[in-house]
Image (cartoon, helix red, strand yellow):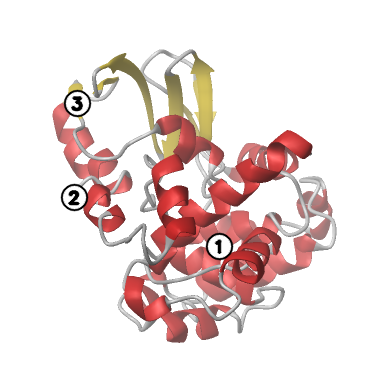
Amino acid sequence: MLLTVTDDFSPEKIHASGQCFHWEQTGPDAWRILHAGHCVRFRAQGDGVFSFSCGEEEFRSVWAPYLDLDEEYAAIRRRIDPRTDPFLWAAAESERGIRILRQDFWETLVTFIISQNRNIPAIRRSVELLCALCGEARTDDSGEPYRTFPPPESVAALSNEALNSCKLGYRAAYVRAAAEAVASGRIRGEDLRSADCEEAVQTLMQIRGVGRKVASCVALFGLHQLDAFPRDVWISRVLEEAYPDGYPFGRYSPYNGVCQQYLFAYRRHLEAPSA
């Protein structure tokens, strides 16, 4: 099916944003995405038109919500005043096209536990190994095989040896703890989605190995808590350099997480020429 997007939407910037680990660029202006057991291929046709390999019904039920197409990101950017906040304005203009995906809670929890102190290729490799170990084998619309992300019950049932084969290192114990918490119902994504953002973060931090940064990432990317504001080394630099008197969280609520993504991507790109 064909989709015409008039709002901010850049697959390149979403793919590079670090919020998801199941996107694959398959060619110029072409991608394959795995999400919640589904797989779709899409290609940019130009002038805001994208062709998706799925039918209209699947697109409406799976991919439109996943891409958060009901949210107007241009309106979020218009909340930023270049006179009072020139750094965020420049970041939003530079990184327009980023959207916060509505990802599966369980998968997001595991992938961000895996992401601790690792680069993106290493994260993706561990995710691939975990899916190969106990995900369901399927084929996409072009006949290419893929593996779904395994459910928490399957991961919790793995032996230590099997988990270690996924190149998780010390994170293997944390992945097991998360699997057991979700499989048992002690941690429920549906409950956390309707909770206050800080309450969701605090609940996630009860899982062994989940600190505030990972919990905030899961709240933003896995629960769609758009006010969550993960802090890593890049955001810490932004806050120190551009907001020495404090960041105006109240001004941008309930979209601080969207602003965080603009700041995160922009600060990394500022560093790139000298990196």
Number of other residues with Cα within 10 Å of mark 2, as a class: few under 14, some 14 to 19, many 20 or more: few
Determine which residue is flagged by label 1.
Answer: 109
Tell me: residue 67, above or below residue 193.
Answer: above
State the SS at label 2.
Answer: loop
Image position of 43 (left or right of 78) = right
Residue 18 percent location from the top left of the image: 57, 47
Mark 1 neighbour class, 10 Å CA radius: few under 14, some 14 to 19, many 20 or more:
many
Give the residue drawn at x 52%, y 46%: 20
Residue 138 locus on image (x, y percent)? 46, 29
Amino acid type at image mark 3? Leu
Image quadrant in which you'd find residue 207: bottom right
Quadrant the C terminus occupies: top right
Give the SS element for disc 3. Answer: strand
213 horizontally vs 27: left or right: right
Which mark, by number, is residue 70?
Answer: 2
The vertical placement of 24 against 211, above or below, is above
State the residue position of label 3.
Answer: 3
Q: Would residue 215 appear left or right of 163 to someone viewing this image?
A: left
Q: Amino acid at mark 1?
A: Leu
- Using the numbered discs, state the Cα–Cα distance from disc 2 to disc 1 in whole angstroms: 24 Å
Q: In terms of depth relative to the viewer, which is nearer, 203 or 273?
A: 273
